[in-house]
């Protein structure tokens, strides 16, 4: 987490997604839970503009294979149905199967206060 000024912290989100969701929103055919997850992430980022940065990363991008081995491991174990995978400040905190809106918001609030 980066500090900006004296009291501002910036949280960096990385959301690993299939190509259909690479623009930051998943179409309905990706599944209701994937749509809800990306919508929640986008909503929280919008509410905390300047304090949260984020990027959607297509899992087929070449750097994923070399820089995000933990993501590749999850994909090998569970397949594409595990997507999206969410990292906060480089640490994997959730995927499609474990994502919980309230827990995500709680983690963000704790990170902002830390």
Image (tube, rainbow, N blue to C red):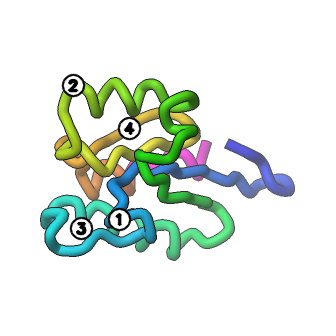
The residue wearing badge 4 is: 93
- Report the mark closest to the observer, 3 or 1: 1
Q: Nearer the viewer, residue 105 or 97?
A: 97
Is the C-beta separation of discs 2 and 3 under 8 Å?
Answer: no
- Helix, strand, or loop for circle 3? helix
Q: Residue 35's mark? A: 3
- Helix, strand, or loop for circle 1? helix
Q: Residue at x 46, y 25 (%)?
A: 69
Question: Does residue 47 show up magenta in the picture?
Answer: no
What is the CA distance from the residue labelled 3 to the residue labelled 1? 9 Å
Reply above or below: 24 against 53: below
What is the CA distance from the residue labelled 2 to the residue labelled 4? 17 Å
Q: Residue 77's mark? A: 2
What is the CA distance from the residue labelled 2 to the residue labelled 3? 22 Å
Mark 2 vs mark 3: which is more N-terminal? 3
Is the C-beta separation of discs 3 and 1 under 8 Å?
Answer: no
What is the CA distance from the residue labelled 1 to the residue labelled 4? 19 Å
Mark 4 is surrounded, within 10 Å at the Cα level, by few (under 14), some (14 to 19) or many (20 or more) other residues, namely: some
Mark 1 vs mark 4: which is more N-terminal? 1
């Amino acid at each position: 987490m980066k500090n900006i000024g004296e009291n501002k912290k910036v949280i960096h989100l990385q959301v690993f997604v299939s190509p259909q969701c690479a623009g930051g929103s998943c179409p309905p055919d990706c599944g209701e839970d994937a749509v809800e997850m990306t919508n929640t992430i986008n909503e929280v980022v919008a509410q905390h503009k300047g304090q949260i940065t984020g990027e959607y990363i297509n899992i087929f991008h070449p750097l994923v294979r070399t820089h995000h081995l933990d993501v590749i491991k999850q994909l090998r174990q569970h397949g594409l149905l595990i997507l999206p995978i969410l990292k906060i400040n480089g640490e994997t905190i959730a995927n499609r199967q474990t994502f919980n809106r309230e827990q995500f918001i709680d983690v963000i609030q704790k990170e902002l206060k830390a």
